[in-house]
Image (cartoon, rainbow, N blue to C red):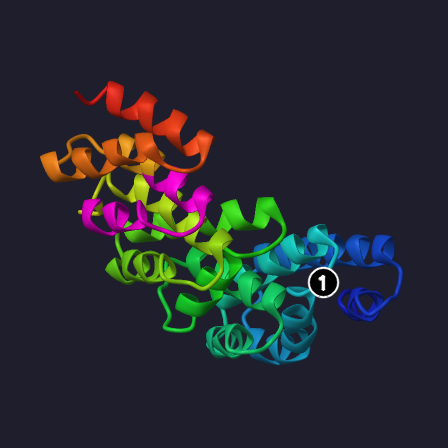
Amino acid sequence: MADPIEPHLSALSSPDPARRLAAAAALEQALQAEQESGRTDWEPLTARLLPVLIRGLGDPEKGVQVHTANCLQLLARHSGAVIPALRQAMGGTNRRRAWGAALVSARLGLWLPEMRHALSDAMSAQDRDLRWAAAQLALALGWSHPEAVEMVVETLQSPDPTARKMAAYCLGGMGAYTAVEAPLTGALRDPHREVRRAALLALNRLPSLSPEAIRQMALLRFDPDPQVRRTAEAVTGRRR
């Protein structure tokens, strides 16, 4: 009987991105079929698949990453080998792979220590979609995992201004379920104009503000940057 898995595994190593994408999609379908058929011996199959799927999380083709993440999420329901492999990927040097592993872990409802660096790092990515996806993931995780909130607050101290900006925006959403005024007020003094502006907008999302926070926001009406000044005028005008 022909092996329904092996051809897709081989194609996932192809230099052709279209072929890798087709293989990843086909592999996801094949695993779903195995699950629906009531397969019980998942460990040997997982051992074959894990190295290739973990590598696929770092694929430059976004669709390959999506399908391999879906495969790993499915396998995690049947094999205890998946979570350690995800943790190892998050601790590696491949940023894209670390992000993909964090994504799978979050979908499984987990908070793992390695996710702290993987998600914080993803918020500094050049890819705008990836940055926002990481921020949205942290926002969702924060409802049930205080460690995610701590990670975002720590990211406000990142040496990368893009990461600090994304952390500020993320904290604005987290204000729906936790206290974030203090770190955001501190970010109003950030040396980078985009971070200051993000902090203003994030504070403006909070349902209530202390008089001191409003005072600090109002000071930015005299900011050296005209865009920050305009934002400060707009948001403090609604808070008076």
Quadrant placement of the C terminus: top left
Quadrant placement of the N terminus: bottom right
Magenta-colored segment: predominant secondary structure? helix
Is any atom of residue 41 visible in this view? no
The picture quadrant where one finds residue 37 is bottom right
Q: Where is residue 113 drawn, in percent x and y? A: 36, 73
Q: Residues within 10 Å of mark 1 (few under 14, many from 20)?
A: many
The residue that appears at 51% across and 77% down in the rendered structure is 91
Left of 119 or right of it: where is 17?
right
Front position in the image: 229 or 200? 229
Amino acid at pointer 1:
Asp
Q: Please, is residue 84 above or below residue 129 in the view?
A: below
- Magenta stretch containing residue 142, yes or no? no
Please tell me whether mark 1 sits on a helix, a strand or a loop. loop
Q: Where is residue 90 drawn, in percent x and y? A: 51, 72
Front position in the image: 230 or 85? 230
Front position in the image: 79 or 117? 117
Left of 217 or right of it: where is 54?
right
Q: Please, is residue 235 above or below residue 160 in the view?
A: above
Left of 78 or right of it: where is 19?
right
The residue that appears at 24% across and 59% down in the rendered structure is 146
The residue that appears at 41% across and 38% down in the rendered structure is 224
Front position in the image: 109 or 199? 199
Q: Where is residue 196 drawn, in percent x and y? A: 38, 43
Which residue is identified by label 1?
Answer: 59
Left of 204 or right of it: where is 132?
right
- Magenta stretch containing residue 193, yes or no? yes
Is any atom of residue 183 visible in this view? yes
Q: What's drawn in magenta, residue-wise? A: 181-199
The residue that appears at 86% across and 56% down in the rendered structure is 19
The picture quadrant where one finds residue 215 is top left
The picture quadrant where one finds residue 110 is bottom left
